[in-house]
């Protein structure tokens, strides 16, 4: 049976970081994939490390070839990929645990040809969240191209690794990397792919960790004359792309914006830390060492909470909220009314100060409105969810489904019925005491 996704990783002298990359892929929540590790003539231990992974996991397929460069190596992988979708990663980077799941879910739910996602820029021990498209709906080719025109040299649009592609489109039009280019060959591939695509979707949740390392292609210096030649060559492709996308009137209207590529392209490869950067490791919640395997009622409750938070966190990242903000919204969606701030803080398990700050942010963002219940001032409050919150409330259903799928994976229908029966009895026993 063919895998749903082929994940392609070119490998060249990557012994220092290839394990981090591969481990992040093999520990994905989504498991129906093949991992193609293409050893591009490495002279270090990269090849043997890849072979070891292949001996331990049947999803890993390793190919050894002479050194021909990253573009030719990706083409080599494309010729051998069997998945319905294509995902790329570089060997010195890594992906979030839910990356492939979010990619595939968006592609299938919205029936789109390309999914593009936010990413993390990693500099030393600091990271920043990078994205561009904020629309939460399917985009036409023209709408996507308009976003790209505004930031033509942005890594967000140019690279391969924050996107999910349909293999049938790539094969139907025989799209490949131009191995003759040493700059922006992935951007050129994307331009060609967009020309043959109709629908696009942007994920706001960052799913990729991009590390710019010394010796990488974008870090290498290039002579001024060669740099100018490359930019002019790429602009020729870029200009023809928009002449194809836009009619003559629209092209003339946007011609100056299209030509801005020549200036903005000079910043390719320079993705600085943005305001609001965080310490690496603080961007997502973790679980303390040993908690996964320890027994006891406290450990059970802790693991249950951390699992739910894992899916709540994706919603937080997507909507530029804190995890506490999302937890408050989630708890309120289960209740909606409360007697006092003290009662609500106890319910959501947050201090009153933290809770007040969350409520203020959620109100300011237009997600909720609080109203007092009854004509008498009893202090009892009701939360009204405003239209801006509809998308988040829908995401809660998805998060609960993910949460239940993990908890009940492998259960038979009979076991689920028995679980529901005994769980109801446990609830009644607790209610009787409380």
Image (spheres, rainbow, N blue to C red):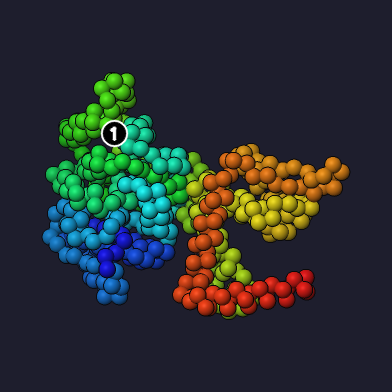
Looking at the picture, does residue 18 appear above or below residue 378?
Answer: below
**Mark 1, secondary structure of its residue:** helix
Q: Quarter-wise, where is residue 420 in the image?
A: bottom right
Q: Quadrant of the C terminus?
A: bottom right
Picture coordinates of residue 143, whole percent (x, y): 37, 34
Q: Quadrant of the N terminus?
A: bottom left
Q: Nearer the viewer, residue 375 or 5?
A: 375
Q: Is residue 158 left or right of residue 357?
A: left
Picture coordinates of residue 53, whole percent (x, y): 29, 71
Picture coordinates of residue 101, whole percent (x, y): 40, 58
Q: Nearer the viewer, residue 55 or 169?
A: 169
Number of other residues with Cα within 10 Å of mark 1, as a class: few under 14, some 14 to 19, many 20 or more: some
Q: Quarter-wise, where is residue 40 in the image?
A: bottom left
- Numbered label tally: 1
Q: Determine if residue 48 is in view.
A: yes
Residue at the spot x=24%, y=67% of the render? 61
Furthest toward the right, the residue is 376
Residue at the spot x=40%, y=48% of the render? 110
Picture coordinates of residue 218, whole percent (x, y): 27, 44
Q: Is residue 106 left or right of residue 385?
A: left
Q: Nearer the viewer, residue 269 or 429?
A: 429
Q: Is residue 161 left or right of residue 353?
A: left
Q: Determine if residue 267 is in view.
A: no
Q: Which residue is mark 1?
A: 265
Q: Nearer the viewer, residue 109 or 148?
A: 109
Residue at the spot x=37%, y=66% of the render? 31
Residue at the spot x=53%, y=78% of the render? 415
Looking at the picture, does residue 20 appear above or below residue 364?
Answer: below
């Amino acid at each position: 049976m063919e895998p749903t996704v082929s994940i392609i990783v070119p490998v060249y002298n990557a012994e220092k970081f290839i394990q981090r990359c591969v481990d992040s892929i093999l520990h994905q929540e989504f498991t129906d994939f093949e991992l193609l590790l293409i050893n591009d003539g490495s002279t270090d231990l990269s090849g043997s490390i890849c072979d070891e992974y292949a001996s331990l996991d049947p999803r890993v397929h390793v190919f050894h070839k002479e050194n021909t460069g990253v573009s030719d190596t990706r083409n080599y992988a494309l010729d051998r990929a069997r998945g319905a979708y294509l995902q790329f990663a570089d060997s010195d980077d890594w992906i979030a645990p839910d990356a492939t799941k979010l990619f595939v879910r968006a592609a299938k739910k919205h029936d789109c040809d390309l999914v593009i996602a936010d990413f993390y820029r990693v500099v030393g021990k600091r990271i920043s969240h990078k994205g561009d498209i904020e629309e939460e709906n399917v985009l036409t080719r023209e709408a996507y191209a308009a976003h790209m025109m505004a930031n033509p040299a942005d890594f967000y649009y140019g690279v391969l690794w924050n996107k999910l592609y349909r293999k049938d489109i790539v094969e139907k039009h025989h799209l490949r990397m131009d191995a003759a280019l040493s700059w922006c060959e992935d951007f050129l591939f994307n331009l060609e792919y967009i020309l043959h695509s109709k629908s696009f979707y942007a994920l706001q949740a960052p799913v990729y960790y991009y590390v710019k390392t010394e010796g990488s292609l974008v870090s290498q210096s290039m002579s001024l004359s060669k740099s100018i030649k490359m930019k002019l060559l790429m602009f020729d492709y870029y200009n023809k792309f928009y002449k194809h996308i836009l009619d003559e009137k629209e092209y003339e209207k946007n011609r100056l914006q299209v030509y801005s590529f020549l200036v903005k392209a000079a910043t390719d490869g320079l993705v600085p830390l943005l305001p609001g950067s965080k310490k690496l490791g603080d961007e997502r919640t973790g679980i303390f060492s040993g908690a996964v395997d320890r027994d006891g009622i406290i450990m059970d409750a802790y693991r249950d909470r951390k699992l739910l938070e894992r899916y709540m966190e994706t919603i937080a990242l997507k909507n530029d909220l804190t995890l506490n903000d999302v937890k408050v919204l989630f708890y309120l969606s289960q209740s909606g009314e409360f007697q006092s701030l003290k009662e609500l803080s106890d319910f959501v398990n947050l201090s009153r100060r933290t809770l007040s700050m969350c409520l203020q942010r959620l109100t300011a963002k237009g997600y909720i409105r609080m109203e007092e219940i009854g004509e008498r001032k009893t202090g009892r409050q009701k939360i009204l969810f405003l239209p801006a919150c509809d998308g988040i409330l829908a995401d809660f259903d998805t998060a609960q489904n993910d949460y239940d799928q993990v908890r009940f994976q492998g259960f038979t229908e009979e076991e689920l019925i028995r679980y529901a029966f005994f769980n109801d009895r446990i609830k009644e026993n607790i209610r009787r005491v409380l």
